[in-house]
Amino acid sequence: MAEIRFKNLTKKFGSVVAVDNIDLHIRDGELLALLGPSGCGKTTCLLMLAGIYKPTSGEIYFDDVVVNDVPPKGRSVGLVFQSYALYPHMTVYENIAFPLRIRRRPKDEIDRRVREVAKMAQIDELLDRKPSQLSGGQQQRVALCRALVREPDLLLLDEPLSNLDARLRIETRSEIKRLQAELGITTVLVTHDQIEAMTMAERVAVMRKGKIEQLSTPAELYRRPENLFVASFIGDPPMNLLRTQQSVENGRPRLNGGDGFVFSLPAEFEQSLAAATGRDVVLGIRPEHVKIVGRPGEHAVRGEVFMTELLGRDTLVDVRSGDQSIRALVPGDVPLEIGENVWLELQPQYVHLFDAGTEARLPDLDLAGSEAAAVP
Amino acid sequence: MSRKSKLFVALLLLPSLLITLVFYFIPAVMTAAMSFTDMDYRLSWNFIGWDNFKRMAQDFLLPRIMKNTLVYTFATLALFNVGFSVVLALVTSFVPERTGRIFQALWLLPRFTPPIVYGVMWMWILDPTRNGLLNSLVVASGGRPVNWIAQYPMATIVITNGIIGVSFGMIIFYSAIKSIPREFIWAAEADGASWLQQVRHVTLPLIRWPLLFVTAYQTLSLLTSYEYILILTEGGPFFATTVWSLYAYNLAFGGYFANYEFGYGATLSIVLVVLGTIASIVYWRVFRFREMMSEPKIEVM
């Protein structure tokens, strides 16, 4: 087992900076996800962990040892690819045995360990088959077995579920999580799929353009995105992000979104908005926190139904209010006509405020309060 | 398919059919016919039945020539056209792409060079006097000039042919290696395989088809090639480097005393064609080439 540290880790390909001065601490036994759109540097990080890429600068520590110059075979790392990369000319048995055979382990030990790990992954019936004779899910298990057979200190999973169909993905998700917890093996999962990251990982590092935008638990990512990118990336359907100008009327802060869109906030928000005085503010609220109400209220804005999509359990309602478009996720099949006038209630406790210039989250109310209270 | 579209397909195939017919099929048939004649410089079609084949069976030179042909073909194949070209393909795919490409381009140069120029270059390299390139090195390091071609005739023709022949396999294997998804190589690396282990357990098995194809193709190509041997050694000294195809050529057209034995030459050629065909069929079966063929991407018929 191992804990992993990135210190000022940078990887450049020519003039392209793939990973930009990252610091990261992966705890022993933890399942951490690197989440981000393609090209964000997450796979580059993974390949540097495996020893396939060498960092341009900075260090990677396995426990207290710098491993920058340690080749893959000197590291105790198991790697699973999105494409599985099973050797097509070898049987399942030979594929799983390969890392041990390379290390010239005794035949009986190889045999025992291959059968052990295959049994654990429930593919012990398939050992004589060739990869081409297996389903995607089975191939995935073989790849996992090959990565686990030599009991590595670190398990690296590169988009392990992307090639599986939806139902299998859900099953495999929990299976990998259970296996990881059982073995207690430090694991890094690379994915562009937020659901995969959120459901499997203990902590998620959201990456963009080679940098880590936010590192926190899945719940925290959802509840308290630290900037506009994370806010827009996490959540499905995505958060409503409305660009507004701030003003004060009757002692209460107001956000003007243009063409009649006006949203009044409780007075306490003034504190929070003060961090972005004179600048535009992005008002964020998740579709599931937008309520469609029949009458005007304190935190309601007026709008016109533009479109509805029935998603099964819920309905996604797209409402135009002034210059803004707001999506509300409401339970059940809602009988709304296109063009119908509605009121949308944006509950203040679910509102996220961002500085439109710096894209950073404005200080939270309760947090600001508790900080003040903490001062002796 | 309608009559009209059948006609259209036939029309499309016609040009290549004609070319095959005129330049490959008819000459082959004529050679086959000629092998039953005692045609000489008078070019008369005088059929003599199986006499040429009987003569072949008694030709005391033939065992030696057969041995030469086998040694030449399989030594060149194993050492150069397949063996060394795999090594070069691996090396050039491992170094930075630009370096590899430049190296390959240089190695391809002899292919674009007229054979006679390439041959003369080797004559200079192997010249028996102290003016030859190799001998000037030998002399410079205190040795005595060596008569390379006379002393090592078989090695000479294997090396000179091999150095040109390498580039074909090198290019094909290089492309095949480059088209292996890099995840396979990464996986092998992560599994702890050294470079040599990756080559043995992953790369070579994954380029199995190109390997078999080049082996089969180059066997046939070497069986029938003789131009560099003709230029460098003319098959000598005393038949030491005369291979089957060169023997047939010399009987018909060349040697020091022009024989013009077209009839007997044709007999030897036609036997070589039959041997080549047998070799192809064996390769086709043993290497299971049918498995390598994919379904056509569009449906024509």
Image (cartoon, coloured by chain):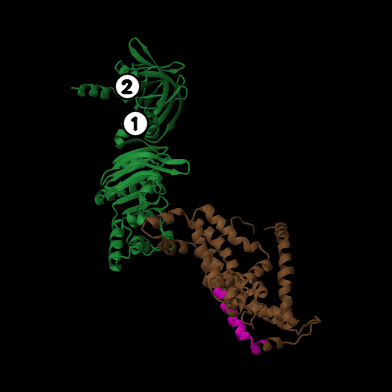
Of residues B223 and B89, the one nearer the viewer is: B89
Task: Give the percent coordinates (x, y) of residue B119.
Answer: 65, 70
Residue B26's place in the image compared with A66, above or below, is below
Label 2: element kind: helix
Residue that sits furthest to the top in the current view = A250
Bounds of the magenta span? B56-75
Q: Main structural element of the magenta stretch: helix, strand or loop?
A: helix
The residue where tag 2 is placed is A348
Q: Would you identify the image quadrant in which residue A296 lies? A: top left
* Amino acid on which disc 1 is placed: Pro
Q: Which chain is green?
A: A
Task: Give the percent coordinates (x, y) of residue B268.
Answer: 67, 81
Task: Give the percent coordinates (x, y) of residue A25.
Answer: 29, 41
Of residues B292 and A319, the one nearer the viewer is: B292
The residue where tag 1 is placed is A225
Residue B289 shows in this picture: no
| Chain B display color | brown
- Tag 1 near tag 2, CB within 8 Å: no
The structure residue drawn at horizontal position 71% and vertical position 74%, both measured from the top left corner, is B28
Q: Report the Cα–Cα distance between label 1 and label 2.
A: 16 Å
Q: Would you identify the image quadrant in which residue A342 lies? A: top left
Of residues A266 and B256, the one nearer the viewer is: B256
